[in-house]
Image (tube, rainbow, N blue to C red):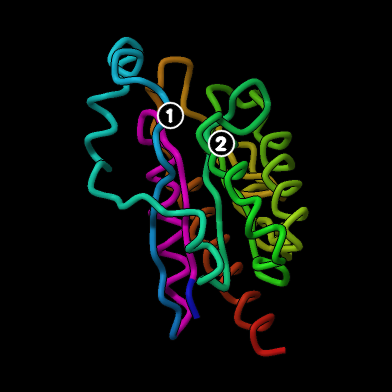
Amino acid sequence: MKTLVLFYSTYGHVWKLAEAVAEGARQVAGNEVLVKRVPETLPKELLDQIGATGAQQAFAHVPVATPDELKEYDAIILGTPTRYGNMCGQIQAYLDSTGGLWATGALVGKVGGGFVSTATQHGGQETTLRAVHTALLHHGMVIVGLPYAWQGQMGHEEVTGGTPYGASTVAGGQGERQPSENELEGARFQGKFTAEVARKQAAK
């Protein structure tokens, strides 16, 4: 079985969640897990201007996934920052390039889900994840979220991400906040749970 954790990250928050999702997916025996990123679409000048160039060096070694390779995986989990309550342009552009896979039904029956980062607690985490789900549903994929079996999203003692639609983190207005251990644990839970569902789906 193969799982792809595919992400775009501006300042590294989504990348850290991606690593945690992959860590959880690797807990399922016999599951080959790959972490890859989508191509950057912003010019370097703009990345320099918003202070993202240096942050992105931390995960520059992560390979870029081609759209055609998606058909090789049993599970695909997408990570994106929120842009006005929706996916970032980089993820959207990548999904827009998967028309050939849609036309042939290459992803029908595969398992998928999403995880996200927003600047604030109410910055569109759930709407962004629903947008991810919509794209995956158009491909005929089976959607897996972050069920309330993970009790970390039930607490209110600290600021935290985590929704039934998928794992999430709150980055802060200047990107100053890193994913908490609770948020990372939610990502691990989602990764493992998604891989378990994918295994059952593949066995049908």
At x 57% / y 73%, what residue is drawn? Answer: 74
Q: Residue at horizontal 47%, vertical 27%?
A: 171
21 to 120, vertically: above or below:
below
Residue 91 at x, y percent in the picture: 54, 39
Expressed as whole percent of the image width and height from the top left, the position of residue 42 reads: 40, 23
Cα distance in 3D space between marks 1 and 2: 8 Å
* Residue 102, x across and y down, in percent: 70, 57
Residue 20 location, quadrant? bottom left
> What is the magenta range?
3-29
Per the image, label 1 sits on a secondary structure element best described as: loop
- Residue 41: assigned label: 1
User: Counting residues from the N terminus, which is met first, the one under dot 1 or under dot 2?
Assistant: 1
Q: Which residue is mark 2?
A: 93
| Label 2 environment density (alpha carbons within 10 Å; few <14, some 14–19, many ≥20) | some
Q: Provide the secondary structure element on which disc 2 rests.
A: helix
Q: What's the amino acid at mark 2?
A: Ala
Quarter of the image with the C terminus is bottom right
Q: Amino acid at mark 1?
A: Thr
Q: Are marks 1 and 2 in contact (CB under 8 Å)?
A: yes
Residue at coordinates 73% horizontally, 34% vertically from top-left?
127
Magenta run includes residue 25: yes
| The one of 173 and 60 positioned closer to us in this rendering | 60
Residue 140 image point, x, y percent:
76, 62
- Above-or-below relation of 86 to 66: above
Q: Is residue 102 left or right of residue 21?
A: right
Q: Nearer the viewer, residue 4 or 178?
A: 4
Give the image quarter of residue 202.
bottom right
Query: Residue farthest to the top?
Result: 49
What residue do we see at 65% from left, 75% from top? 197
